[in-house]
Image (cartoon, rainbow, N blue to C red):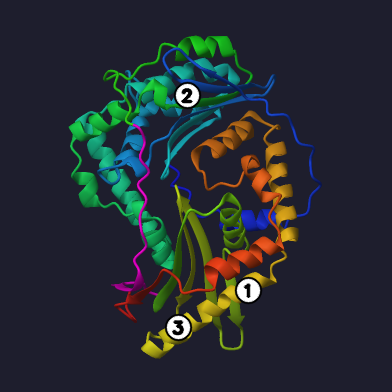
Amino acid sequence: MRKPKVFWLVMVFMMIFTSYAVAAKPPETFKKVVLGNGLTLMYRVMKNDPMVSMYAVFPIGMNTERQKGIAHLIEHLVFRGGSGFTFKDILEATNRQGGEFNGFTSFYSTVFNYVVPKDKFDNAFQIFNGSIWQTDFSEANVSLERKIVVHELDMDYAMRIPYYPIFHYFYAENFYSKETVDAMTIQNIKDFYQTYYQPGNVTYVIAGDIDPKAIIAKLEQIQNGYGPKVVPKGVLNEYNLPHQDAVEERNLYPYQYQVLMGYQFIGLSPTDRMVLKMLSYLYGREYKVDYQRNESNVYNVVDRSLGNEDYFGIYYLESRHPYSDEEYQAVKNNMAKFIRQFKKVDLKAARKEFVRAVEKERASSNQSAVDAVEYEVNRLTDPDNITVDSLEVLEKIDNQDLQRIIDKYLSGPPTTWILVKNNNPGGE
């Protein structure tokens, strides 16, 4: 299963500085219909395309959890099957027919996807719907997926070490544990599923050589297998960075220590938010290399928006020099000076290249059913994504906006300094 999409920085950075001709803006060709049971369908007929791609997008994720990890666990359980279908049936209908299946849980959403040859669509669609709407929460399935979800946490550990402050403070919802997963009862899982997995709380996105009338007739019959329920109005669970200085000790081998300089803002305008996003994409990873001494300094810039709150940070990893108060103070001074790098950006030029990248991505979604559906789902699942919906704001920002953001928001002291030390230097 795909993990929540935390870092798109490298991918977007590469996109910006790739040369290409801008394709003409294609018409928006997805049709949208709300069915009698409340289900929203977005579909696009692409004649003669060999594959059909289908997504089910639920606007629920880690932001709706009272028990951390339950949304991700249910995502896994859906792929165990339901309505008499099993994981083997899912595999037979997708991968073994030359297609694929996938899913992910993010802060805002839980998403399920099949891609299948068009002549296998009817069977795959039946399995897709049966698994989602009558998920099998047997003790055997729940027990197995508990182990798999915890194993994924263990697999993530090595990846998280280089980005510990970012994951821990900017993506705090990812820090569920074996204990929180084991604490969920089957009844807890069923209650969450019945509460949020209702037809009025999902958008299906389907593209390919399809018959919309036949699809609509099948989707009109969908109901939650455990019974109807009123979906609570969504409440965004925001969070606050710690204020002033925070120090943690973790085993960060081979890193000696890490420092995060974090800013927290409330009520930024769309223009201000877009400037910060552009800075994080352009400076997603900035290397300072001394080849003679075989040393490198790595500064990372990251941003995140949650509702009316925005978070912006610069963080630094030190792999060679042990921590000392003097070193820490020097690093803090250097990080504060790093903001000067932003003044070198020609935001107008960078914006132009980024607009071209967005337009190219949209144009490429015309080429296949798979690309078309992925692009629409990208627009649905994460408000932090810069897509065609962002162009109106993106096209208007300029160097004056950049200077104003630096002067107004980044010239003063940050909300917090976070220091993470290696408490086991020299050891694994």
Horizontal side, residue 247 vs residue 34: left or right:
left
Which label belongs to residue 320?
A: 3
Separation of marks 2 and 1 at Cα, in angstroms: 52 Å
Q: Which residue corresponds to the image point at 59% horizontal and 20% vertical from the top-left?
A: 118
Picture quadrant where residue 62 is located: top left
The C terminus: image quadrant = bottom left
Q: Amino acid at mark 3?
A: Arg
**Which of labels 2 and 1 is toward the front?**
1
Q: Mark 3 or mark 2: which comes first in sequence?
A: 2
Residue ID for mark 1: 341
Separation of marks 3 and 1 at Cα, in angstroms: 24 Å
Of 164 and 159, the residue lying toward us: 164
Q: Which residues are magenta?
A: 233-255
**Which of labels 3 and 1 is toward the front?**
1
Which label belongs to residue 93?
A: 2
Q: Secondary structure at mark 1?
A: helix
Q: Mark 2 or mark 1: which comes first in sequence?
A: 2
Q: Which residue corresponds to the image point at 24% horizontal and 35% vertical from the top-left?
A: 142
Q: Is residue 41 above or below residue 260?
A: above
Q: Secondary structure at mark 2?
A: helix
